Image (cartoon, grey):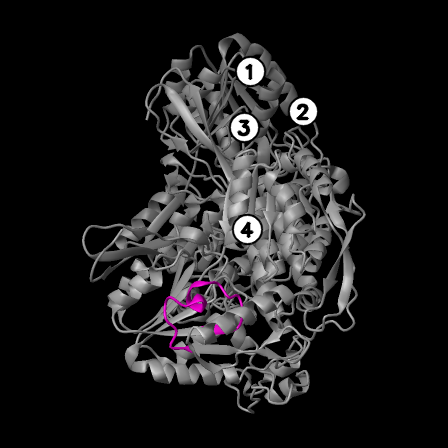
């Protein structure tokens, strides 16, 4: 679904904890476990001076917000139903959260519609003040950064330091970036033929439904609400049922920052009920969805079945990462590794088809497997741990099933290949070599810590194979040859191409997919188009002059 | 020059549109704020002038000296340019900084200025003479808004990739120009500083700024905030000094890449010449005006009178965009005149620290005498003095709000920029006539038209040769909207996205590729 925000930088920032701390932090591993805790794991080597300043999770964090947020108030669900929220690292119940359904969506839409009325405080507000509100929200997120990062790690199982340095940093930057755009979304005056004066107004679309996934809960929240609010829309956002907690904390900050009631409504709930109600709603003007390609199709159909609401989709990927023999090998191995294993492999951007040139193939596989073996699994709140649990049982089972298919279809298992730590949702970092393009693990999105390494010989061959997928989200290429870099990056059918880097994302840079990886773009200036209607106003005048 | 539209945050006082602030919300000022900084700011350090000279800065409300300020000259400009050049060196912290972090620094500067609003407003009023209520609710908030606006641009100033012919890949980089000299005037000291720094820093330039010798104090305090929020040394250097010495040294400097000047058209000529005589540095100029304000007979009379009064008298008439030629259609001329005179007579002139004061002193004795000279010429050349016309207090540089009627286009007061509280009202009959007369000037900064008729509004706004046209309003400024002049009123635009162009070099990078594909 999504990737990280400058992960390479962030990984550097997280380097300092010594591996001994990591060991202490590990959950007891099973005998015979493949994890090899070396003292000199390159990701966790020297303890730098940053050790003292390393943020620590908030101890014994209590969940403060568990209700539905409509009209700047907390509501219980109309049905009276609640849903359980678990910590995937322990399986413990964190809390119960009010479960939104159709009736709650209706309430939220009414509130969002009222907030969008002509003459409402939100519609009459100066654009620069919308920007100021987003900036204030960024300040509040920064203030609560530790709490939000802790909540995120508890709820999603992601590494606390990653949540702190990557997810929360990206959230703050995204809010600030779009805060800056609010009063820079400029219409045009247009030299039409005849005695007319024509100008365009870039108006908000209206009530926007937004459905976000569980892999980067708070960051996806910011990616969705920031451009929508910057353009002046109102929002109904459904966080994933697995990870509603940071979104609810954000709701509280939205109220504190001073957004008028109804501008943002946050409804925790399930896809087939609340999500479907949003997608089919006759009074929602636009829907933005991030999630699987299968559900993306349902969203598009729902828009067609209902009111032709505008649809933007950020969906799955099976992203090629192409490594040429003339690259910096050690660096490419490291980037390909983090390009796949980041966030427990739960990234739509994951570089899950690593194409390696023939002459360096064996060396690349060997080093990649060594890197994977060195990964430290354990409690995501503890420094030194670099892989947490998968999000839930369903994902866990799906990943293991795909690993079994890889073994059965004849790929070579270099390391990992099974669960880690009985009765938990952890999966061993897994590397397959000798993967062929027809295997399921080469075609289907695994969304887990499973790296496929394929062999290639020529530029044209690898371009053709890399593009032979119905996905088109991201791609990487590693080479020191400028011609190869430019040729491959032009030829790849993907929304993002990274040259000699991977997952290098930033809020200024657009993000989205070719083909079945989605429709439209998020982030950057491009995202503003997805949240504006253009109105051309033409006025008859008595005499035109240039 | 300016009015901020504060209606969202402060109550609108209907019918008093030039007073869109609530006196209740403004803290009681100290009329004697302490001056903390009076030296040159170079490389984030306070320095005496190389010559050791200093000059006095005067409180125009009393004529008394506030303090001595270090006086920059050519040697100090050289030092500042060296610091700015070093800060701009390839690989320097400033050059390597993320654009979003440049934006964050500008945001932090806006926050620090907002925090110190009351103090800065006191200092501005002390040094410049403008009413404290205006400093507090117009000048400082607009500074904050301008800096926040350009903070947002820092990481949104995007180059392009360009589909050129052949097997090439072509893109543009928007690079900073380099060391920018900036020379600012005394009429809106803080605001002009923000207008200059915002786009220059958002785009990654370094700055050597000369502030006006009449009003150096607030700029120096802002310098301390620039250091406080964390701009690297040498990025901003602030030099109080005189035009013919320090200003000239900047304009003629061989290692200054660009100069931006706001001030008189006369000095604008000198700046352009200096660039031509030295290193062809890029020049942007915001100069004088003699802006027409056209009142059609179908306009809302009360609104037109009030806005026209504000258009001229705001800031003691010391605005380059002052509506100093008020053209009124003949059928409403008498009523408009009568109401305008009544409004001018009711204008409260006095101690700028008094909350009721609408008009303070002129900035200095030179301006004071020059304006009185123009008033004499108006009388001499046969204009009809309707009110005012003289000195308004026995000390300080106060002038009575003055209105001339029956002004003819050929009179000196209808042709030259007075830069004081002197309103010229002229009569016209037809649309075509007034457009022609309004354009019959070497200036082209601003203009306005008051009418309810959509066709007239479009006809006049298209026909006027001016960088800014206001319809049924005047002096409406937003950081988002460009500002600058046609003809002798200047070159280039400040504010808005357009303001970024004047601080950017475009670099085209073209790379040979083996094979191009769409």
What residue would you read off at disc 3?
Answer: B422
What residue would you read off at disc 2?
Answer: B15
> Where is B399 relative to B35, above or below?
above
Q: Position of residue A233 (x, y in %)?
A: 59, 40
Q: Where on the picture, by quarter, is residue B221?
A: bottom right
- Give me the C-alpha separation between circle 2 and circle 4: 57 Å
What secondary structure is marked by label 4?
helix
Taking the spot 52% from the left edge, 7% from the top edge, the residue there is: B331
Q: Please tell me the numbered disc located at residue B382.
A: none
Q: Magenta part of the protein: which range? A: A433-451
Q: Chain of mark 2?
A: B
Q: How many marks?
A: 4
Q: Mostly what secondary structure, the magenta segment?
A: loop
Q: Quadrant of the C terminus of chain A?
A: top left
- Give me the C-alpha separation between circle 1 and circle 3: 23 Å
Taking the spot 40% from the left edge, 24% from the top edge, the residue there is: A197
What residue would you read off at disc 4?
Answer: A295
Residue A488 is left or right of residue B124, and the answer is left
Foreground residue, B350 or B98? B98
Q: Nearer the viewer, mark 1 or mark 4?
A: 4
């Amino acid at each position: 679904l999504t990737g990280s925000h400058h992960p390479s930088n962030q990984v550097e920032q997280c380097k300092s904890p010594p591996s001994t701390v990591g060991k202490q932090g590990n959950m007891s591993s099973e005998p015979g476990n493949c994890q090899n805790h070396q003292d000199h794991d390159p990701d966790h080597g020297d303890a730098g001076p940053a050790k003292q300043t390393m943020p620590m999770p908030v101890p014994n964090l209590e969940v403060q917000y568990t209700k539905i947020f409509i009209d700047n108030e907390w509501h219980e669900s109309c049905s009276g139903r609640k849903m359980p929220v678990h910590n995937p690292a322990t399986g413990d119940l964190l809390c119960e959260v009010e479960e939104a359904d159709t009736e709650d969506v209706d309430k939220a839409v009414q509130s969002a519609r009222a907030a969008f009325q002509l003459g409402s405080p939100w519609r009459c507000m100066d654009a620069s003040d919308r920007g100021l509100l987003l900036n204030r929200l960024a300040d509040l997120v920064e203030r609560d950064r530790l709490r939000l990062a802790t909540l995120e790690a508890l709820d999603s199982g992601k590494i606390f330091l990653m949540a702190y340095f990557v997810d929360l940093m990206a959230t703050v930057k995204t809010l600030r970036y779009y805060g800056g755009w609010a009063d820079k979304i400029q219409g045009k005056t247009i030299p039409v033929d005849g005695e007319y004066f024509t100008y365009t107004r870039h108006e908000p679309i209206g009530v926007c439904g937004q459905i976000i996934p569980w892999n980067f809960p708070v960051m996806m929240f910011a990616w969705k609400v920031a451009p929508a609010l910057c353009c002046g829309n109102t929002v109904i956002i459904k966080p994933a049922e697995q990870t509603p907690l940071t979104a609810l904390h954000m709701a509280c900050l939205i109220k504190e920052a001073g957004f008028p009631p109804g501008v943002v409504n946050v409804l925790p709930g399930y896809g087939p009920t609340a999500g479907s109600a949003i997608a089919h709603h006759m009074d929602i003007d636009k829907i933005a969805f991030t999630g699987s390609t299968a559900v993306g199709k349902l969203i598009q159909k729902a828009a067609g079945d209902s009111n032709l609401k505008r649809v933007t989709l950020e969906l799955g990927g099976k992203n090629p990462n192409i490594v040429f023999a003339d690259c910096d090998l050690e660096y490419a191995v490291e980037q390909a590794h983090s390009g796949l294993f980041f966030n427990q492999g739960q990234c739509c951007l994951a570089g899950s088809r690593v194409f390696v040139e023939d002459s360096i193939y064996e060396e690349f596989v060997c080093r990649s497997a060594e890197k994977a073996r060195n990964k430290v699994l354990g409690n995501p709140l503890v420094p030194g741990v670099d892989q947490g649990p998968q999000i839930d049982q369903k994902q866990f089972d799906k990943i293991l099933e795909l690993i079994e298919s890889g073994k059965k279809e004849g790929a070579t298992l270099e390391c990992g290949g099974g669960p880690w730590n009985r009765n938990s949702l952890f999966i061993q970092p897994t590397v397959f070599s000798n993967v062929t393009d027809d295997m399921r693990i080469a075609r289907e999105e695994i969304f887990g810590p499973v790296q496929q390494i394929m062999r290639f010989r020529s530029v044209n061959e690898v371009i053709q194979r890399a593009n032979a997928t119905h996905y088109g989200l991201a791609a990487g290429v590693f080479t020191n040859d400028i011609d190869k870099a430019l040729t491959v990056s032009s030829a790849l059918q993907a929304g993002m191409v990274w040259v000699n880097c991977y997952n290098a994302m930033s809020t200024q840079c657009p993000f989205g997919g070719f083909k079945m990886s989605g429709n439209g773009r998020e982030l950057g200036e491009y995202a503003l188009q997805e949240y504006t209607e253009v109105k051309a106003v033409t006025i008859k005048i008595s005499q035109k002059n240039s | 020059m300016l009015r901020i539209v504060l209606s969202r945050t402060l109550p609108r006082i209907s019918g008093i549109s030039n007073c869109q602030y609530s006196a209740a919300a403004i803290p009681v000022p100290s009329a004697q704020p302490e001056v903390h900084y009076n030296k040159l700011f170079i490389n984030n350090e306070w320095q005496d002038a190389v010559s050791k000279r200093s000059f006095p800065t005067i409180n125009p409300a009393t004529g008394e000296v506030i303090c001595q300020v270090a006086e920059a000259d050519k040697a100090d400009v050289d030092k500042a340019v060296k610091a700015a050049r070093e800060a701009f060196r390839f690989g320097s912290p400033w050059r390597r900084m993320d654009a979003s972090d440049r934006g964050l620094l500008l945001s932090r500067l806006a926050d620090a200025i907002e925090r110190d609003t009351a103090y800065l407003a006191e200092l501005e009023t002390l040094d410049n003479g403008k009413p404290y209520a205006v400093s507090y609710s117009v000048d400082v908030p607009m500074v904050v808004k301008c800096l926040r606006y350009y903070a947002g641009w820092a990481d949104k100033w995007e180059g392009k990739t360009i589909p050129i012919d052949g097997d090439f890949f072509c893109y543009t980089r928007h690079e900073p120009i380099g060391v920018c000299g900036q020379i600012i005037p005394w009429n809106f000291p803080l605001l002009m500083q923000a207008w200059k720094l915002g786009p220059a820093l958002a785009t990654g330039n370094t700055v050597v700024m000369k502030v006006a010798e009449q009003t150096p104090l607030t700029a120096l305090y802002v310098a301390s905030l620039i250091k406080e929020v964390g701009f690297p040394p040498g990025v901003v250097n602030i030099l109080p000094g005189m035009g013919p010495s320090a200003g000239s040294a900047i304009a003629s400097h061989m290692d200054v890449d660009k100069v931006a000047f706001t001030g008189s058209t006369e000095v604008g000529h000198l700046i352009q010449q200096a660039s031509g005589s030295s290193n062809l540095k890029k020049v942007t100029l915001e100069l004088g005006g003699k802006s027409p304000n056209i009142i059609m007979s179908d306009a809302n009379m009360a609104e037109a009178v009030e806005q026209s009064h504000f258009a001229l008298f705001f800031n003691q008439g010391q605005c380059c965009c002052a509506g100093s030629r008020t053209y009124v259609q003949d059928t409403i001329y008498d009523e408009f005149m009568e109401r305008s005179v009544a409004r001018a007579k009711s204008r409260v002139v006095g101690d700028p620290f008094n909350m009721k004061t609408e008009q303070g002193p002129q900035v200095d004795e030179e301006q004071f005498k020059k304006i009185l000279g123009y008033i004499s010429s108006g009388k001499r050349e046969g204009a009809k003095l309707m009110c005012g016309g003289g000195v308004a207090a026995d000390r300080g540089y106060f002038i009575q709000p003055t209105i001339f009627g029956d002004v003819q286009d050929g009179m000196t007061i209808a042709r030259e920029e007075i830069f004081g509280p002197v309103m010229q009202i002229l009569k016209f009959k037809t649309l075509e006539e007034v457009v022609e007369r309004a354009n019959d000037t070497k200036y082209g900064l601003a203009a306005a038209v008051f009418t309810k008729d959509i066709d007239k509004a479009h006809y006049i706004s298209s026909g006027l040769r001016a960088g800014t046209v206001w319809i049924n309003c005047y002096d409406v400024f937003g950081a988002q909207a460009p500002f600058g002049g046609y003809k002798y009123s200047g070159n280039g635009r400040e504010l808005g996205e357009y303001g970024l162009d004047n601080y950017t070099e475009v670099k085209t990078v073209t790379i040979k590729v083996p094979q191009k594909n769409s």
